[in-house]
Amino acid sequence: MQLTIREAASYLGVSEPTVRRWVGQRGLPVHEVHERFYLNPLELWEWAAENNIPVSRGLLEKARRSPDEIPPLAELLRTGGIFHEVEGATKGEVLRAFVDRLPLPPEQDRAFLLSVLEAREAMGSTGIGNGIAIPHVRNPIVLHIDRPFVTLCLLRHPVEFDAPDGKPVHALFLVVSPTVPAHLQILARLGFVLRDEVLREMLRRSAPADDVLGRIELVESSRTTGSFAAVKDAPE
């Protein structure tokens, strides 16, 4: 859930120019999408409390009624898609093929997204080891979309990614979300399931999408049951 500048001004009881001034002068957290600012209700509430700025209690009530409800990771991947046999001989070619496959609205600027991903890679590899990379920019990829998603690309041929363990990358995940809190929650879930050795092996051999999703559902369910050790060595 996101708020426009006008909505934020209403909850704060100030003018829109004041809200915009606070963005630049007082660190009011905003997310820019196509030159428009959006605010997360919980972030706005916390900022107002920290800065001793009165705010309508309706803002917190609204945020509590409509929190960032994150679907299971398998569902996020069904939305974003799992793509096999993705071509690319270099990191740049792979990133371009990746961005081309993202289920983004027509108005989203894919060329810009590709440029920021390439700039991030120039600063340091997003490879995390074991042949897996999670391309991202310095700030979370927050776009004005209806719901978050995760896209997975499994490469036809592993590509050198300057990963910390020196292994070429064969699987790339990209997280796209409408808010920063949602983005961080999804990254945490992704980090958890990628601890699973069976899942990593399935990614290495480019297993069918249904098999990958089934394994992710099993591993993610262990987050609440505490049974991660039990599924870690489960048969494929």
Image (cartoon, grey):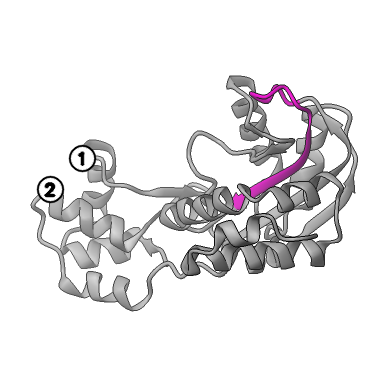
Of residues 224 and 74, the one drawn nearer to the viewer in this rendering: 224
Specify whether 139 is left or right of 221.
Answer: left
Residue at mark 1: 26
- CB under 8 Å between discs 1 and 2: yes
- Whole-number angstrom distance, CA of label 1 to CA of label 2: 9 Å
Residue at x-position 42% and y-position 49%: 31
- Residue 212 location, quadrant: bottom right
- Residue 136 location, quadrant: top right
State which quarter of the image contains the C terminus. bottom right
Residue at x-position 81% and y-position 67%: 210
Q: Is residue 147 visible?
A: no
Q: Which residues are magenta?
A: 161-175
Specify whether 94 is left or right of 174.
Answer: right
* Amino acid type indicated by mark 2: Asn
Residue at mark 2: 51
Crowding at label 2, few (<14), some or many (≥20) Cα neighbours within 10 Å? few
Q: Where residue 206 appears, x then y in whole percent?
A: 86, 50
Is residue 99 inside the magenta stretch? no
Q: Where residue 80 appears, x then y in whole percent?
A: 70, 60
